[in-house]
Image (cartoon, rainbow, N blue to C red):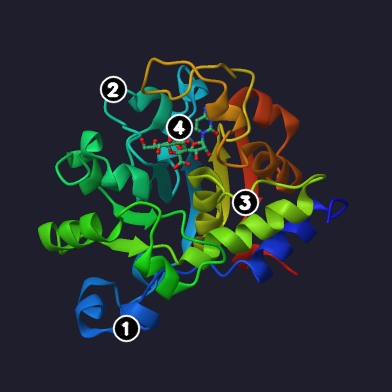
Amino acid sequence: NPHATGTELLCQLQSRVAVTTLLGDEGPFADPEWRGLLPRRSLRQELGPLGKCAVVSSAGSMLGSGLGKEIDSHDAVLRFNGAPTTGYEQDVGTKTTIRLVNSQLMASPEQHFLDDQLYAQGALVAWDPAPFPGDLQEWFEAPDYPIFRPFRAMRSQRPQQLFHLLHPRVQWQLWGLVQEGAPEAVQRNPPSSGLLGTVLMLSLCDLVHVYEFLPSQRQSSRCHYYQDYVDEACTLGAYHPLLFEKDLVRRMNQGSPADLARLGRVTLPGFRALNC
Ligand code: NCC
């Protein structure tokens, strides 16, 4: 509801969004072949409960932030899609614990998902804008982008690397909360990787710092810190309901206004640290 406090919103998030990945025990993924490809244990079990975590948005305003050391001081760091660290260490750090990728990237030949060493570091988590409300059989038959082929290819190429598929229900449960908190009808497109990654880290960590998801005083129309092109829609949203996502995070933020303005940093207690 639009009047809920930050803690109430975090508690709603915790109780309404089951942050899970596929474990080969459900629907079309319960067959022996898929069971062999999918992880046996949850991400939480694999990575252990984490302390302080950082979520690094890909926003152009990360550039010149000088936040690299601060970001690397976290126990775990989540990055998105093709966002690099090489060449940008001073501003975004070097550590990558989890990389959240969308299916568009995985399916696009120009992104070289299977060849680029960028995707070899840390654990991978992938998601696809599955049909609402996230039924596994329906998704399996008609993913938005062909996510399953590159997933299988990566699993056989690097069987030792952790690679999880986000349950398609997660995005729609989250979308429901975004809609409830919004003053108007929200387009029925899934939330951006930014909000999905933030919620993923809330489920794994005691404390989460999110950088440049809510823009700092460095806000610019540059889309990504690692690419030289300008598009306001990257920050404000077009396909994704980004403005509403950001409003939700703004309301949940427990950090100071100065941290937001100066560092672009939002502070959120992880689910385990909540007292609902
Ligand atoms: O751009 P993208 O996201 O990879 O960025 C990751 C997350 O950072 C936050 N962000 C980014 C730029 C900006 N100026 N402000 C921001 O707040 C957002 O939360 C964003 O989710 C995606 O969400 O997966 C997205 O992916 C790209 C693209 O598919 C990938 O980068 C792979 O090339 C989408 N771009 C296009 O489809 C052209 C983007 O809309 C969303």
Q: Mark 4 vs ligand 1: CB under 8 Å?
A: yes
Look at mark 3 in the image and give the residue it sits on: 188
Q: Is residue 244 left or right of residue 59?
A: right
Which quadrant of the figure has residue 269?
bottom right
Give me the C-alpha separation between circle 3 and circle 4.
23 Å
Q: Is residue 121 left or right of residue 131?
A: left
Q: Please identify, in this view, whether the residue under mark 4 or under mark 1 is nearer the observer.
A: 1
Quarter of the image with the C terminus is bottom right
- Tell me the element at label 3: loop
- Tell me the element at label 2: loop
Q: Amino acid at mark 1?
A: Ala
Look at mark 4 in the image and give the residue it sits on: 58
Badge 4: residue crowd in 10 Å (few <14, some 14–19, many ≥20): many
Q: Which mark is residue 87?
A: 2
Q: Amino acid at mark 4?
A: Ser
Q: Are marks 3 and 2 in contact (CB under 8 Å)?
A: no
